[in-house]
Amino acid sequence: MRKLFLFAAIVFLGACARRHPPVVAPQAGPATVKPQARLADVLPRPAVLEPRDGEFVVTPQTVIAADRSNADVARVADMVAQYIKRASGLAVKPSSGAAASTISLSITAGENPEAYQITVAPDRISVVGSGPAGLFYGFQTLRQLMPVAGEYEALLFQQPRPFAIPAVHIADEPRFEWRGAMLDVARHFFSVDDVKERESWNNYMKAYEECLSETSTETAPWYVVPADDKATTRLIVSRIILDAFKDLKLEYPQLSPERLQELRKIRKLLTK
């Protein structure tokens, strides 16, 4: 009987071993993540695009060198850090000095405030704008060379992954104040007269700006808030509200002794 039980136990264990093969450790994924766009696919097409040898690899040791005292530079630096976090899970930290792997952001005054230059080398990325708008546009071009995962806020990385940006020199600036306009004829129907009115679009915009300027007062001002980043928008709106409360200089009213005596009588009548 004992031998029969031992034989049954061995058969049972053997069946379990066949049903549950040994667990194999998962293989590591790729060391780097490919960018979402090739250099030839960058839009809008830059005026200067010169591919160079090598690539810049974003790693946990990469830092962002930016002047945090400049609000415009700090805003773009936060955008770069947030985008890298979404694209790879890497938490790139700001730094006041250079490191072995640095993303440098700066503003240097130029003739066209919307112009920018990007230089990607194996040890450094430099984005220089001729103004706040130029630095922002430079980031918009740089993000096209980063992983496409950065475009999605819902992604989570269990383990951060470095990614590479091809070495290149890019310089660009808009040739026109307005690059173009779109008529959404898929959802809205436009007559020929409606389309012709687009010739007066600049006049409409000028009248709109004048309307804002004329109706904005110290006690009821208008604010133009960028809406490209939710966190930045909420921060700006919160700051505006806090500054408005501080400017109001709210305090308890100062009452004369006679007025206080009158209020006490009223309170006494109400509590009877």
Image: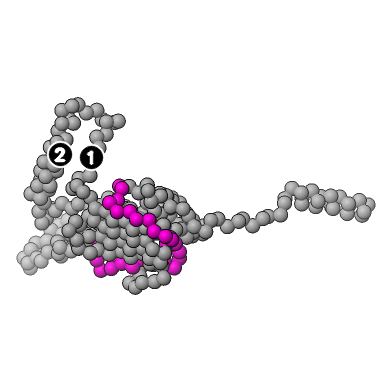
The residue under the point 67% across, 55% down is 24
The residue under the point 49% across, 57% down is 32
- The answer to which of 222 and 75 lies nearer the viewer is 75
Residue 60 location, quadrant: bottom left
Please indicate whether residue 70 sits to the left or right of residue 169 in the image.
left
- The answer to which of 106 and 242 lies nearer the viewer is 106
Q: Determine the secondary structure under disc 2.
A: helix
Residue under circle 1? 181
Mark 2 and mark 1: span between their CA atoms? 10 Å
What range of the chain is rendered magenta?
44-73
Please indicate whether residue 198 sits to the left or right of residue 91 in the image.
left
Q: Can you give x and y, in whole percent of width and height, for residue 248 in the image?
A: 14, 61
Q: 10 Å neighbourhood of mark 1: few (<14), some, or many (≥20)?
A: few
Residue 193 location, quadrant: top left
Residue under circle 2? 201
- CB atoms of marks 2 and 1 within 8 Å: yes
Res 233 seen here: no
Q: Can you give x and y, in whole percent of width and height, for residue 220 in the image?
A: 13, 53
